[in-house]
């Protein structure tokens, strides 16, 4: 009998919008993610505004069940959100290990709306008998594709959205790792935006990335606009990656991903 560690995706999401100037852990806080029994590793935290912003601050806290301690402060600049300009976005790439039951929480200095996304993995330690497989996890390709063409200027997850990929249910996979997303226009484009969302199917649809689209004239010798976005996003089971376009122009959205299933103990 031996002990092995497997991991299951924990994609933490919350929207914060109530002003809170406190640094001592009191006042209005949103819970982004709660650590599992054997702990959770958070590899990145993204703060994404869903409106124009004034100068302010987003604060991250760690709650241990009794005390709430300030962990990080992220300055927010004044930024006017328009169709061709992205709303404020910041990603903190840093390994944060949370003990069992600990929570990552967030607050905003001003009464402005922000989505906070934590990319995490729950650790599970279990006993393994002689029939265990030799690797911790195995992967199966999951190529997600959707065409979007209906204009949608909303940043709150409403309006027309296309589903690029759905993470399988827990019986089929523990994590869907999306490494890149390619945006490929299928026509000439005007200045606009393609937006990426995570749909939890239970607690809401959250904007986390905006991709500016330039004006490009497509013809026989000039290709339509294309870009590839590096994500390294782990989706927990049943969550969806969705997309929208600011203008009524046609784009293919292709998600390059792998479904990982842990070796059963």
Image (cartoon, rainbow, N blue to C red):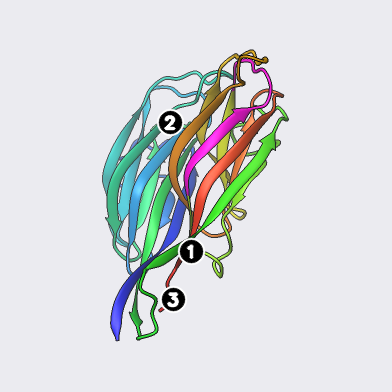
Q: Secondary structure at mark 1?
A: loop
Q: Earlier in the sequence, mark 2 or mark 1?
A: 2
Is 113 placed above or below 246 here?
Answer: below
> In which quarter of the view is residue 134 placed?
bottom left
Task: Mark 3 and mark 2 in contact? Answer it, CB < 8 Å.
Answer: no
Mark 3 Cα shell of 10 Å, populated few (<14), some (14-19), many (≥20): some
Residue ID for mark 2? 89
Q: Residue at x 32, y 33 (%)?
A: 74
Callout 3–callout 1 Cβ contact below 8 Å:
no
In terms of secondary structure, where does tag 3 sit?
loop
Asked whether 186 falls inside the magenta stretch, the response is yes
Residue occupying image coordinates x 41% and y 20%? 78
Q: What span is in magenta?
A: 178-192
CA–CA distance between discs 3 and 1? 11 Å
**Of callouts 3 and 1, which one flags the residue occurring earlier in the amino acid sequence?**
1
- Residue 246 vs 146, above or below: the answer is above
Mark 2 residue crowding within 10 angstroms, few (<14) / some (14–19) / many (20+): some
In depth, the one of 39 and 179 nearer the eye is 179
What number is the disc on residue 174? 1
Front: mark 3 or 2? 3
Residue ranking furthest to the front: 221
Q: Residues within 10 Å of mark 1 (few under 14, many from 20)?
A: many
- Magenta run includes residue 143: no
Task: Classify 165 as above or below 215.
Answer: below
Reading the chain from its start, which is encountered first: label 3 or label 2?
Answer: 2
Residue 172 placement (x, y as % from top left): 56, 67
How far apart are the two marked residues, 3 and 2, measured between alpha carbons? 38 Å
Name the residue that disc number 3 marks.
264
Measuring from the top left, give residue 99's x and y in whole percent.
Answer: 29, 63
Q: Is residue 240 visible?
A: no
């Amino acid at each position: 009998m031996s002990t092995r560690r497997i991991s299951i995706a924990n994609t933490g999401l919350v929207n914060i919008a109530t002003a809170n100037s406190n640094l001592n852990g009191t006042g209005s806080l949103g819970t982004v993610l709660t650590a599992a029994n054997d702990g959770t590793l958070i590899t990145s935290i993204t703060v994404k505004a869903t409106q124009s912003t004034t100068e302010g601050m987003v604060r991250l806290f760690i709650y241990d069940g009794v005390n709430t301690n300030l962990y990080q402060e992220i300055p927010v600049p004044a930024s006017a959100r328009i169709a061709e300009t992205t709303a404020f976005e910041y990603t903190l790439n840093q390994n944060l290990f949370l003990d069992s039951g600990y929570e990552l929480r967030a607050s905003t200095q001003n009464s402005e709306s922000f989505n906070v996304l934590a990319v995490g993995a729950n650790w599970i330690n279990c006993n393994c008998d002689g029939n265990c497989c030799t690797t911790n996890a195995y992967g199966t390709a999951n190529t997600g594709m959707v065409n979007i063409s209906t204009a949608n200027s909303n940043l709150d997850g409403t309006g027309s959205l296309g589903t690029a990929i759905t993470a399988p249910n827990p019986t089929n996979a523990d994590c869907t790792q999306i490494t890149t997303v390619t945006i490929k226009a299928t026509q000439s484009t005007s200045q606009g935006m393609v937006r990426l969302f995570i749909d939890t199917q239970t607690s809401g649809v959250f904007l986390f990335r905006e991709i500016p689209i330039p004006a490009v004239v497509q013809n026989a010798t000039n290709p339509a606009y294309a870009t590839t976005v590096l994500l390294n996003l782990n989706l927990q089971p049943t969550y969806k990656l969705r997309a929208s376009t600011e203008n009524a122009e046609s784009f293919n959205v292709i998600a390059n991903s792998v479904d990982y299933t842990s070796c059963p103990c």
